[in-house]
């Protein structure tokens, strides 16, 4: 089971702050997980579209799309943050 968290506008766009999902297969990368999630429903498809800037953390550490996801992990998606 994976915990998927959405922050800021992604939480609003997906309609949830957190989802629990079964790992679709072993050896999945974060990029592949993002693609799989897009196939789950229209809201996820729009929020996680490849053309949108989305940052990712795996177990509370920033990561890129090549990071491998394992059962029990937490994956967080959020928009880039700007400060001022």
Image (tube, helix red, strand yellow):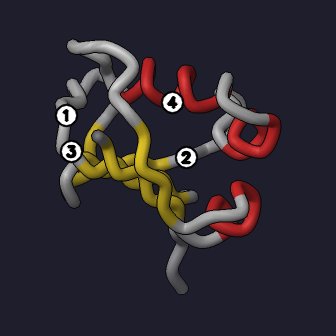
N-terminal-most mark, 2 or 3? 2
N-terminal-most mark, 3 or 4? 4
Q: How far is the residue under mark 3 from the one under mark 4? A: 14 Å
N-terminal-most mark, 2 or 4? 4
Quadrant where the N terminus sits is top left
For the residues labelled 3 and 4, say whether their Cβ atoms are less than 8 Å apart: no
> Residue drawn at (23%, 14%), measured in percent from left and top?
26
Q: How far is the residue under mark 2 from the one under mark 3? A: 19 Å
State which quadrant residue 13 falls in. bottom right
- Give the structural element (helix, strand or loop) at label 3: loop
Q: Which residue is mark 4?
A: 34
- Count of labels shown? 4
> Residue drawn at (42%, 49%), measured in percent from left and top?
20
Mark in the foreground, 3 or 4: 3
Q: Which residue is mark 2?
A: 54
State the image coordinates of residue 75 (x, y, percent, origin top left).
Answer: 34, 48
- Give the structural element (helix, strand or loop) at label 4: helix
For the residues labelled 1 and 3, say whether their Cβ atoms are less than 8 Å apart: yes
For the residues labelled 2 and 3, say whether their Cβ atoms are less than 8 Å apart: no
Mark in the foreground, 2 or 3: 3
Mark in the foreground, 1 or 2: 1
Crowd class of label 2 (few under 14; some 14 to 19; many from 20; radius 10 Å):
some
State which quadrant residue 51 falls in. top right
* Residue 8 versus residue 4 in the image, above or below: below
Q: Which residue is mark 1?
A: 71
Crowd class of label 4 (few under 14; some 14 to 19; many from 20; radius 10 Å):
many
Q: How far is the residue under mark 2 from the one under mark 4? A: 10 Å
State the image coordinates of residue 33 (x, y, percent, origin top left).
Answer: 44, 26
N-terminal-most mark, 1 or 2? 2
For the residues labelled 4 and 1, say whether their Cβ atoms are less than 8 Å apart: no
State the image coordinates of residue 24 (x, y, percent, origin top left).
Answer: 39, 19
């Amino acid at each position: 089971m994976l915990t998927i968290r959405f922050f800021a506008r992604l939480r609003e766009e997906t309609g949830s702050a957190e989802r629990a999902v079964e790992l679709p297969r072993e050896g999945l990368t974060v990029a592949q997980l993002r693609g799989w999630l897009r196939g789950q429903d229209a809201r996820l498809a729009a929020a996680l579209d490849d053309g949108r800037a989305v940052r990712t953390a795996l177990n509370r550490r920033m990561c890129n799309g090549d990071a491998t996801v394992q059962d029990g992990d937490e994956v967080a998606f959020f928009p880039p943050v700007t400060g001022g």
